[in-house]
Image (cartoon, grey):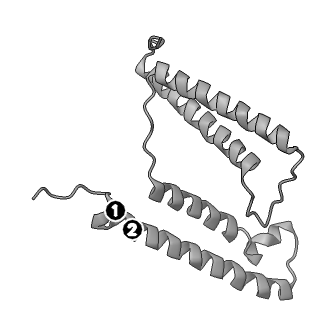
Amino acid sequence: MKKPQIPLSENHRRIVGSSLRYAEDQILFCRRLLTETSENRMTRFADEYSDDQIRALVELCDELHEKLVSFADRAGVSPAERSVSRHVSGIMSSIWETLEDLRPRKLRAYGDVPADAARELEPIVEDAVQIIERVLDFSRRCASSPDSGAEPRPSE
């Protein structure tokens, strides 16, 4: 038997939805940590769990996810539509900002940067920043193309 919808105001529904979306993202992230091989070079995830423990944790993540989905259904929370291009652009902008702080003139805040190191660091950071700018430019062009679905097509 389907449980009745929880009577919430629109404000309550918004905060419940926002919180449940965050929780879902984190649960699915944990599930990926448990089940997928990481391609991270800068971070190594230590695998303390046995295969049986991983299976048990995945089952618990799935159980929690189902519980939250049921909660969302009862609270009348609709799925939020997220723009992939905006998400990619936001992430790339954040990475750009992080990399800009690795320029030798910014690293001086942590002490003098030897001239040899500065000569090596600057072009590496610049190359990475240029790639990010290409990603952002490409993403903008894709998002604004007529086939992207960003704008409705005129009816024929």
> With respect to residue 115, does 135 lie above or below?
above
Query: What is the number of callouts on the image?
Result: 2
Q: Assign a secondary structure to mark 2.
A: helix
Give amino acid for label 1.
Ser
Taking the spot 79% from the left edge, 65% from the top edge, the residue there is: 42
Taking the spot 71% from the left edge, 82% from the top edge, the residue there is: 124
Taking the spot 49% from the left edge, 69% from the top edge, the residue there is: 136
User: Sequence order check: which comes first, mark 2 or mark 1?
Assistant: 2
Q: What's the mark number on residue 39? A: none
**Callout 1 environment at 10 Å: few (<14), some (14 to 19), or many (20+)?**
few
Give the image location of residue 35, x and y in percent.
73, 49
* Quarter holding residue 132: bottom right
- Residue at mark 1: 148
* Quarter holding residue 23: top right
> With respect to residue 80, does 88 lie above or below?
below
Q: Assign a secondary structure to mark 1.
A: helix
